[in-house]
Image (cartoon, rainbow, N blue to C red):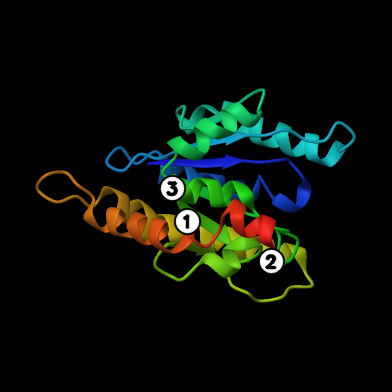
Amino acid sequence: LTIGFARRFATYKRANLMFRDFDRLMRLINNPHTPVQIIFAGKAHPADEPGKLLIQQVYRAVKDTRSGGRLIFLEDYDINLARYLVQGVDVWMNTPRRPNEASGTSGMKAAANGALNFSVLDGWWREGYNGKNGWAIGTEADYTDYEAQDAADAQSIYETLEKQIIPLFYERDINKIPLGWVKMVKEDLRTLTPQFSLRRMLKE
């Protein structure tokens, strides 16, 4: 199971959110029967020092020997690399702190390529998510305490990965086809691709 996380490294996008309980994350991705790899890519604005620190945190996690090579950071992120990522991952994860997400076009591109979105209910995903075409991180609750919001959203990531995403991906029929996963991908393509398009963007 390959999860992609690629975007500008701004602090509100919380690239380090899934590392809050690092031991639990390691247990999830290193299960020999249901292995998971997470690919990170992105850059911070040259003047964004907190964003650069985020990249350092992600890079240190990637280099941690406990990850067994299942955490990956791709350097020199650009539009060409992004094209391969939105085409190649199984799940596109997006973790911005609500309500700061303006749109989320990378998630739209991933959806058009059959990747399932796993995102906070903000930006485009608040409109696109229907409960059957991907997964939500957290709820629509409004927080004044960022620490409480981050803790709740991180817990949601672990719970959803463990109880929904990973089991669905590895549940296969006698022909080794993940029928439940394929059904969700079809729902993704049916509901999201016609709804979020360049035609609509230009029109609006």
- Disc 1 and disc 2 in contact, CB within 8 angstroms: no
Q: Position of residue 130 (x, y in %)?
A: 46, 71
Q: Is residue 137 above or below residue 39?
A: below
Residue lying at the far left in this picture: please name it.
174
Q: Which residue is mark 1?
A: 193
Question: Which quadrant of the rendered structure holds the C terminus?
Answer: bottom right
Helix or strand or loop: what does disc 1 sit on? Answer: loop
Between marks 3 and 1 in the image, the one whose residue lies nearer the viewer: 1
Residue 105 bears which disc, if any? none
* Residue occupied by mark 3: 115
- Up the image or down, 20 lies above or below 5; here it is below
Q: Secondary structure at mark 2?
A: helix
Residue type, label 3: Ala
Badge 1 amino acid: Thr
Q: Going from the N terminus, do you reach mark 3 or mark 1 first? A: 3
Q: What residue is rendered at 53% in x and 30% in y?
A: 72
* Nearest the eye: 188 or 14: 188
When the figure is inspected, residue 74 is found, relative to residue 202, above or below; the finding is above
Q: Which mark is residue 149?
A: 2
Q: Is residue 163 visible?
A: no
Q: Residues within 10 Å of mark 3 (few under 14, many from 20)?
A: many
Assess disc 1: are there few (<14), some (14-19) or many (≥20) residues with their C-alpha within 10 Å of its C-alpha. some
Q: Is residue 79 above or below residue 17?
A: above
Q: CA distance from mark 3 to mark 1?
A: 11 Å
**Residue most toward the right?**
47
Of labels 1 and 2, the one closer to you? 1
